Amino acid sequence: MSVETDLDQFSPHFRPFIEGITTGNWPNKPKGLQKLGIMPEHWLKSIEPGHVRYVWPNDGSHDIQPNRTFGGWVGALSDHVVSICMFSALADGEAFTTQDLQIKLFRPVSQGDITIEARVINRSRSTGYVEAEWKNADGKLLVKVIAWKAIRTVEAIHGPR
């Protein structure tokens, strides 16, 4: 278990995800996360509505060159982190889809613990704006992520349930 949290803070739609992470019993882990090797059950360290903190132990297995993480991996993990952050801030009956995702790489992402923190900066009835930062163990900014999320009903995003 990498994170403890009060499940009552989150919408019923989001609780199974958090329960899977916190209990380690996650029979329906999303296939995209499985295939990419994204492991929130190990990397998510704190979560509250509108804020998440991950620590990714970069072992170099996603490098494109020595000590340079592949930008596509940075993009995939960034998308996951800002999406979980947005998901954590939804009310009951709400879902979202990504409208825009921008990733700015300031320094090479090299091996070691990488802290990724995301916050919902602004939220209206229909749009969420999320920012995330990747920092190395020295606290240097590696990556800045900004994302816009279209907030809709669960039915509008996922169809009738």
Image (cartoon, rainbow, N blue to C red):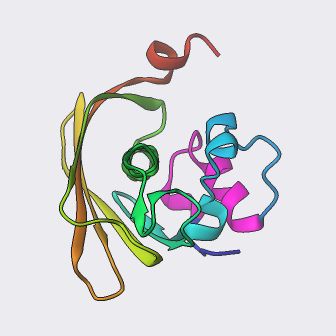
- Picture residue at 48% right of the left edge, 30% below the top: 93
- In the foreground, 32 or 71: 71
Is 75 left or right of 45, judged from the image as shown? left
Q: In the orientation shown, which residue stands out farthest toward the bottom? A: 138
- Picture residue at 36% right of the left edge, 49% below the top: 82
For residue 145: magenta? Answer: no
In the rendered image, is residue 89 in sight? no
For residue 16: magenta? Answer: yes
Q: In the orientation shown, which residue stands out farthest toward the top? A: 160
Residue 149 lies, in percent from the top left, at: 29, 33
Q: Which residues are magenta?
A: 7-23
Q: Is residue 91 above or below residue 96?
A: below
Q: Residue 135, located in which quarter of the rendered image? A: bottom left
In the rendered image, is residue 49 in sight? yes
Residue 91 lies, in percent from the top left, at: 41, 41
Q: Is residue 9 above or below residue 150?
A: below
Is 99 left or right of 16, judged from the image as shown? left
Q: Is residue 135 above or below residue 7?
A: below
Is 156 left or right of 141, judged from the image as shown? right
